[in-house]
Image (spheres, helix red, strand yellow):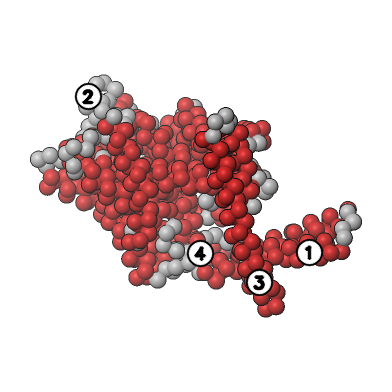
Amino acid sequence: MEQLALLLVLLLGALVSVPIGDRFGVPAPVLMTLLGIALALLDFVPQVNIPPGLILPALLPPLLYAAVRRTSWRQFTANRRPIFLLAVALVFVTTVCVAAVAHTVVPGLTLAAAVVLGALVAPPDPIAATAVAGQLGLPRRLVSILEGEGLFNDVTAIVLYHIAIAAVVTGTFSLPGAVLEFLLSAVVALVVGVALGWVADKLMDMLADATLQVGLTLLVPYVSYVLAERLHGSGVLAVLVTALFLAEYATDPDDVLMRLAGHTFWDVVDTLVTGVAFGLIGLELHHAIRTASGRWGEMLGWAAAVVAVVVLVRLVYLLPATWLTKRLHARRDHDEDIPMTWRETVVMWWSGMRGVASVALVLAIPLRTQDGAPFPDRDEIVFIAFGVIMATLVLQGLTLPWLVRRLGVQADTEVEQEFERALAIRAARAAKQRLKEIEAAEELPEELSEQLVRRAFDIGVRISPELGDEERREAHRQRVTRLKRLRRIQGEMLSAARQEVLAARSEAGADPEIVDRVLRHLDVRSLR
């Protein structure tokens, strides 16, 4: 019961942290981490009791799926080189550097155990980066790269982590075997992701109901993750591939209710699961405090050394990587989204916060090796890892908004508005073209035809009012004013109708199912 109460507190905090964060300019994930830390310091708050093996499967699939819904396969292919340099190469470099320093400064830490530490602190958290960066009005190219890095670096880090764990537990390591395992993990994940995406697409058509389709989207990421892991593939990569497949191919332009319901549903899931995940990060401070008992000085020194390595390696790596990507971009006709100035590179460097994946991996470290001996230096690894997570997430998360304002790195609103206008023109032209096809097949009255032409034009003007000339814009404004008045009155009429239908629920002999069906009809009518 205590664990349930704690979960409810975190869920409530996840909701409340959003408006509080918006009001004070503090990212909601950072607020939830601070709330978790505050709860961890209270004696009456129970310690989190979640099996380590359930943390990654429970939290990552919905968070990854929700993040992928905000992007597209085209963005990933356009940014393939910077994403590879960050999500694969940088994870390897960070793992090696952290392992080397930890093996040197922590007495008795074996090299394999040091690699475990390096792998679990190497990947910046995709949820922290996008949640924080997305609220700051950064250029879309930076947000795209941060999203791509955060989504794909977990694949590399988790595979490295499992290889290192196996080396520690069994006491053996084979480089060719590790490379083969890495490649097979990716291949299995790709096959599972595409296959499950295809099956889910067919099921979407079969269900043909928004409620059932949204429910299926909740199951799909979990099934993809568990199935891939069961087949010794990368669950994270499988979820990403499945989500990208569905975003690319399982899109019906006329399924309006599914899009509206799905968007609302996944916004709720994203908010709640993200809040719980970062709240758990703060609550897990119990482990670090208990581990450091009596050794605060030396263990804080070790943690500080690893934090410095993690932060500095990212900066030292980003400078030449950005230069190299820009050179490749200049030589080839690709529209990659890359940092174009040193200011954007600095913001990208400071956005490398660690979070959910690192916590889940550190808690999943086995207690004992294959021969029954305690996992070497597990307590030290746990403390150092939490030091890195807290330092990067809280320090960088709180100071990133200030850094962005100080450097003046903001999105180009003119480019975004121009793209919006271009889409509005395309939408209006598509509507007019379809109208011409209908007129060729059907005989329409002249008055109706003229009215439909105006409505086709209005499709574009309503998206981007700047499309019309002054006379048409004025006419559009007048129509909008009339439409708003019409919708206000119609809304009040529908409100009265809904109130009357709801009142029938308490009447004798009323069938609640029929009442709800009528109410649903009125609710859908209100959306039109």
Residue type highlighted by circle 3:
Gln
Query: What label sits on residue 451 in the rendered view?
Result: 1
CA separation, marks 3 and 4?
52 Å
| Tags 2 and 3 touching, CB below 8 Å | no
Q: Toward the viewer: 18 or 357? A: 18
Report crowding for label 1: few under 14, some 14 to 19, many 20 or more residues within 10 A (C-alpha): few
Q: Which residue is pictured at 58% across the width and 55% down the height? A: 492
Image side of residue 198 versus residue 327, left or right: right
| Tags 3 and 4 touching, CB below 8 Å | no
| Tags 1 and 3 touching, CB below 8 Å | no
Residue type highlighted by circle 1:
Gln
| Residue denoted by label 3 | 478
| Tags 1 and 2 touching, CB below 8 Å | no
Q: Quadrant of residue 12?
A: top left
Element under disc 1 = helix
CA separation, marks 2 and 4?
51 Å
Q: Which residue lies furthest to the left in this view?
A: 294
Residue 404 visible in image: yes
Element under disc 4 = helix
Q: Toward the viewer: 179 or 448? A: 448
Residue type highlighted by circle 4:
Arg
| Residue denoted by label 2 | 373
Which mark lies nearer to you, 1 or 2?
Answer: 1
Which mark lies nearer to you, 1 or 3?
Answer: 3
Mark 3 or 4, nearer chain start? 4
Q: Which residue lies furthest to the bottom in this view?
A: 470
